[in-house]
Image (spheres, rainbow, N blue to C red):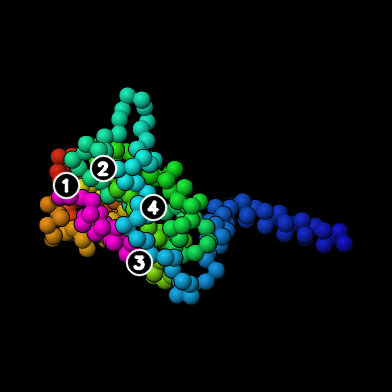
Amino acid sequence: MKKFLVILGIVVAVLLILGYIFRGALQVGVGLYMMQPDAGFAETTPPQQPDYTLASNWAALPNRDDVADRIPIANTAALQSAASVDVFYVHPTTLLGGAGWNQALDDEEINQRTDYSTIMGQASAFNACCRVYAPRYRQATLLSFFSPQGDGGDALELAYGDVVQAFRFYIDHYNDGRPFILAGHSQGGFHLDKLLGDEIAGTPLQDKLVAAYPIGYYIDDSNGIPVCQSAEQTGCQA
């Protein structure tokens, strides 16, 4: 019995040591497991497609009060109504759980998370120079970036389709010929990289592009838009 307890103690000690050494990998593994949807992308029904004629499907619009109007100090001002330049902003991933591969746009908990983190903290940076347009879209869950060739890739493609539709609606109904900036972070930057190649490069819109900021995503000129070489350059991405 004593020998058994000694062996058991050694095994427990080894497991504790291994758990400590690999605690980071274990935490990541548990996190990924918790984010896993119950079924594959093909076995699920996508959330309802957004209708961008509805203001509720925009996280920020310049003609209404929203968190993109927030300013950091009292002696600055949001000047969207007088701005001669627009910004089309695509928010990063805020769908972190395993509820599905893509966000349902009537999920108010996620909408609030998006608004009071990324819209307030990032999109609002442009409100002194630009009219801020930020669509809600059926963003892909964070897990999608760990399986970009499978279910995750399908979820990202669905999300990108919404971004394209929102951008086209913005150009047709909101832009009114003004120069514009494209900005996005993380998943938003991922979608903007593709949008630049599909909708901007080689089209008349390229002449209206002030700059693109696909933050948190690798950039090069493979999408047809040059990388900025100076602070004064326009029509480029940084």
For this orientation, the residue located farthest to the bottom is 43
User: Disc 3 marks which residue?
Assistant: 157
**Res. 65 image quadrant:** top left
User: Disc 1 marks which residue?
Assistant: 178
Q: Secondary structure at mark 2?
A: strand
Label 1 with label 2: CB-CB less than 8 Å: yes
Q: Which residue is at the front of the view, 8 or 208?
A: 208
- Asked whether residue 173 is drawn in magenta, I would say yes
Label 4 with label 3: CB-CB less than 8 Å: no
User: Disc 4 marks which residue?
Assistant: 56
Residue 216: image x %, image y %?
34, 50
Residue 68: image x %, image y %?
35, 41
Mark 1 or mark 4, which has the lower sequence index?
4
- Label 3, label 1: how far apart the Cα atoms are: 29 Å
- Asked whether residue 80 is drawn in magenta, I would say no
In the rendered image, the quadrant that contains the N terminus is bottom right
Q: Secondary structure at mark 4?
A: helix
